[in-house]
Structure formats: structure tokens, C-alpha cells
Amino acid sequence: MSNRNDVVDVLIIGSGASGAAVAWSLAETKMKILCLEQGDWMKSSDFPSNGRDWEARRYSDFAISPNRRARPTDYPINDDNSLMKVANFNGVGGGTIMYTAHFPRMHPSDFRVRTLDGVADDWPIDYAALEPFFAENDRMMGVSGLAGDPAYPPRQPPMPPLPLGRTGARYARAMNKLGWHWWPSDTTVATTEYDGRAPCINLGHCTPGCAQGAKASTDITYWPRAIRAGVELRTRCRVREITTNEHGMAAGAIYYDPDGVERFQPAEVVILACNGIGTPRLLLNSASSRFPNGLVNSSGLVGRNLMLHPWPQVRGYVEEELDGDRAPMTVLWSKQFYETDPARDFVRGYTLQFARGTGVVNEAVTSAEIGRLPWGKDHHRAYRKLVYHRLQIGVACEDLPEEHNRVTLDPVLKDSHGIPAPRIDYAISENSQRMMEHGIARATEILTAAGATDLYTSRTLLNSPGHLLGTARMGNDPERSVVNAWGRCHGVRNLFIVDGSIWVTSGGVNPTSTIQALALYVADSMKQRLATLFD
Amino acid sequence: MQNTSEPGLTATQAHDLRQIAGMMIPASEEFAVPGADDAAIFDDILRSLGRDLDSVRAALASLSTLAGGSFADLDDRRRESVVDTFLSSETPDVTTLGRVVLQCYYRDDRVLRSLGLEPRAPFPKGHKLEQGDWSLLDPVRARPRMWRDVP
């Protein structure tokens, strides 16, 4: 080993949604905490909405696919054997740099799917256990929303919701005509000045970073507080493997520093926060003579039960000019079909997510791709009926765990440091397919009620939503799970996981809110047990 | 003959690309917009090929194969026929070529003005978003609770 650093009390790997939350929460213990992040700090002046090429950059250095983006800080992912592709971001803030800022919580029923619906497994924790951490996270990230949604237990978003705008009002009238539930979405887009953040000025869709700083990403929410509290964050440090000592405990991590030099970082506690693909990749790359199938993989479940959230979309066009990309993308959600209904031919359910439309380039590109925008003399007339006239509804389907959907190590593909890259094998289940078709039919009814025509259905969202869940699931039985009910790995008692990989089921919601609440819950559990953490 | 060691397209490839770009999006007097073969727009396309260069080269190679040589040198009727076949092939490379043309065309000042849009970056001015009618929410507020109790 070329270099060995001083030992730290806690080593966190990954600075995204969960890594930032756990770092901030543990900082009050005054332990020596270090986070290693393979990406860079982002600068708001570098985000696409600063320039005229802002839409084009979503196809290059701000693409949601790491394979397309291919920054030096990215690692490749072999997703050839999956209809749904992987979306992520590697940098301080992780996926929160590139998410849409849609921020629904899981529902109480999501934690009891075996008990309620006889499928998959119950979580070893419940909504009530997470509720205080949902609220704490809402304050830390700064959530805009509206109290009183009949689809959820009571909650109090700290900022008012985003405006309905023309698009939201159009959806709302259609939903009222059908008599179906809708509610303004919770988002982490600031609608007022909040904790040093300026309010949203509607720069366009929020996915490729927010130049205004109105969208919460953990580089501007949790990290400044964590660093002020003494946590150290090192960027451009890519971890290769977790090592263990003669007692079978985690000893630390081998990583490559910004100069490509291999280093060893010893630690008393190691916390993984690399999400549903990065975490199993790291555990599988940490195989040793004591752990020949990968670290903490005695159950064989590391990498299995990958859940990606099938997310079909239906779009249509109306004569009225709508908001398009001149506002945050998300506007409303509907939970009308979220809970299981025995009359249907599938179990569990989905959220309907209502989008405002898209920008001038994206409208042209996505319409040309499906043959709705002709080339030649008819191009201009057709385009003017499309741009800023789009309604689009996403069907966020709950993806149930199946062991054949998994992350493994690719035998050939490697990252720029020579570390084996992940490969995913994923197929959409029959239950999910039936759920998708039900949601597509309902979305079609809504768009029709809204007066839309020229409907088009996409059954797999290009590049997928980037929800990477379930590959190191939590549970009380070491033979059926990888971590226990408070995130500690079975068999290696100083190794913890706090990201989306520990999810037992996926719910039908964007996961970031629940991922962060779970990370805060694990951190709190650790703080409550500091004297007996390894017992 | 394609020279893949060149930093951009060969002169023949560029000529073919300009020709087909103008056929994909022609100028329109009715909408007062240039075509995608307009000098400024085409310069932007050439400058912006970036990581799409290889894919665009591949698309142009298939166009050249369909044309039996230089596409731009064909007569009008033959060009129309080749373009129809080329664009309907819907290969990933053809799709990329289309995107490369569109993402430059729809950021041109003249095109944006013709759409009634201000040609500028979103930041720092942003956009106005109307609140909308929140009374639409009243019937939803009146609904009974929907979430399930759990044991």
C-alpha cells in the first residue's frame, strides 16, 4: 500500500442524498468524520441554464445517463440487458444535482406490503418510525408544498407550493371533471427565500442543476452545515474496495486520490451511501478470502432485487399555450390509484405525476424521434402545434422486488481506474406490466378530459427515472437481508448502509425524500447506541 | 473518402450534411424563418458536433451509400428519394443526426423570435408563472382521507 492516512471514526462513501444527511446528523457527536466523493463540487455558474445551449447540454455533459455523460468522474454501467436505463450523477450532492426535485414521501402502506397485500416483504420499520425524520429532512432540504392532502397522514411543508400555472389548472379541471384525487406536488424547489436560498424564478426544467440555487441539492443544504460542524469532505476520491481486518470488521477503504494515487483510509466505522448500483458494486468488488462472494453477501442478496420504477408516460397536445419549460417540471400528483384495489388485475399501485411540458429543443427532438414532427415543408406548421402545447403524465409504478433483477460486476467493462464496472440485468414483471397498462389507460382518460389530442404513449421512459433501489435490503433475518432494521450490515458490525439499496420495496414514488429520512433514522439509531454500536 | 483522423467532417460530408439539413428543415417565408442550411445555423451545427461526430459521420456514410456517392451532387428528384429512405430508416445514427440539426436550429435568434420567444439564456431573467386558480382544489380538500391504516 503506497499511502495510509490517519484513522477516522467514521468514513462515509458518497456525498449524495443519503451521505450528506448522515454526515450532518452524526456531526453533533464530534466524532472525526470523513466523506470520500468520486466527483467534484458543482458551481451554479456551470449549470446549463446559464447559456444558450442549455437544452443541448442535456444530451452531453449534463445527460442523466452516466454512459452518455461520460465525465471523468463517472463510471460506466453495462445496462444493455435492461429496457430501462440507469440515470445518476457523480459529484457533491450526487443524484440531487440532477433530480427533478419531486419530493413525495412513501405511504404508510408501503412498509407493510406482505401484511396488507401478501406480496414481497414487510419492512422492519414503519412510516411512524420515519415520520420525525421526514419532517426534519423537509426542513433541511426546504420543501414547498401544501398541507391537507387527503392521500397522506398530516404533514407541514415549510414553504408554499409552486404555482399551478396554466398547465396545472388545465390538469386540475380535468381531474375534477373525473372526480379523481389530485394535489400540488411536494418539491424541493424554494418558493420563498429559504435558508440562504433564493426563490425559484422559473429557469426551466430543474433536472440539469439550478443556476438560481432554488432547487435543493445536498451540496447547498446539508453539506455546508456538516462541514461547518467539522465533517471533512474530499472530492475526486474514488473508492475501490472496503477492507476487513482479522476480526471480520471493516478496516477502512482503498481509494484513488485526485492524482490517481492509491491510498488506504482506515476507519472505526464505514458507512456506504452510493445508492442502489454503486453500493452493491463496491461490496462485490470487496470480495476477499473471508468474504469470497463479496462483502456482507452471505445471504447472496447483495445486488439482487434491483427496483427501477417502470415509468410509462402519456402525452397529448391542446390548443391553449401552456407553461412548457418556463417553470419547474413537476406540478401535481394524483394518488387516486396508489393503494391496492382487489378489483384490479395487479397488486399495489402507482402515482400519476403531471408534468408541465418541455422546451423548444426537447419538444422538437422528442417529437421527431417518434415521427410526430415531420421533416420537410410541413415541419414548421406541425412544430407550432406542439411547442408549449404539451400535456404529459407519468405513471410511477411500484416495482416489486425480484431476485433475478440484479447488479453484478461486468467481466470486461472497467472504469478509468481499472475498477470493474457494474452490469444490470432487469426485466419488468407481469404485475408491473398490468399496472403500467392500467395507469396508461387512466392517463389517457385524463388527457382526453383535458381536451388533448394526438396522444402518444411511451412504455419505458428514455433513460429511466434513475431510482436505484433494493440491492442490499434491510430485514431482521440475516439469511433474507443484508442490513438490519437500523442499517447495520449483518456479519460486519461496523459497516452501515444508508442509501436506496436498503429498501425492501419501492413504493410508487420518487425516492429521495424517503432515502434521506431513512439515512437520518439510521444516523439517529447509531447515536442512540454509540456505547454498544458493535454489540 | 472519409478521413476519420480529421477533427470534423470532410468537405464532402459537410456538403452532404448541409444539403440534407436544408431538406429536413427548409426555410419558410410564411413563418419568416431560415432553413437549417442557413450559414449561421450550419456553422453552429458544425461547431457543436462534439461527442456526436462519429455518429453523424456514420449517418452520412449511410447517406452516401444510398446516394451511390455524393448526396449533394444528386439531382433534386433523386435527392428527395434518397432522403425519404434515409430518414425513414430510424437508425440511432440517423436519429442523432436529426437531434444535432434540431438542437442548433431551435436556438437560432431568428427562429426563436418567430416563435414569439426571447432569444436568451434562462438565467438570470427567468420566466413568470401565473398562480392559477386554487379554488379548483376545493373539492379535493373535501374528500375523506385516502391512505390505508397499517397494523
Image (cartoon, coloured by chain):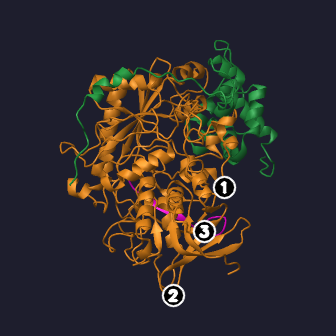
Kindly identify which numbered label has been placed on residue A239.
3
- Residue A460, position as x, y percentages in the image: 43, 44
Residue A334 falls in image quadrant: top left
Q: Quadrant of the C terminus of chain B?
A: bottom left
Q: Which residue is mark 1?
A: A40
Q: Dominant secondary structure of the magenta stretch?
A: strand
Asked if residue A146 lies left or right of residue A273, the reply is left
Secondary structure type for disc 2: loop
Q: Residues within 10 Å of mark 3 (few under 14, many from 20)?
A: many
Mark 3–mark 1 distance (CA, rounded to whole Å): 14 Å
Disc 1 and disc 2 on one polypeptide chain: yes
Write down the colour of chain A.
Answer: orange
In this view of the protein, which residue sits in the foreground, A274 or A61?
A274
Q: Are marks 1 and 2 in contact (CB under 8 Å)?
A: no
What residue appears at the point 30 percent right and 52 percent down from the top-left corner? A110
* Amino acid type, residue under disc 2 in the picture: Glu
* Amino acid type, residue under disc 3 in the picture: Val
Residue extent of the magenta highlight = A413-427
Tell me the chain of label 2.
Answer: A
Q: Residues within 10 Å of mark 2 (few under 14, many from 20)?
A: few
Residue A126 falls in image quadrant: bottom left
Task: Choose the circle earlier in sequence order: 2 or 3.
Answer: 3
Q: Which residue is mark 2?
A: A246
Task: Choose the circle earlier in sequence order: 1 or 2.
Answer: 1
Tell me the chain of label 1.
Answer: A
Kindly identify which numbered label has been placed on residue A251.
none
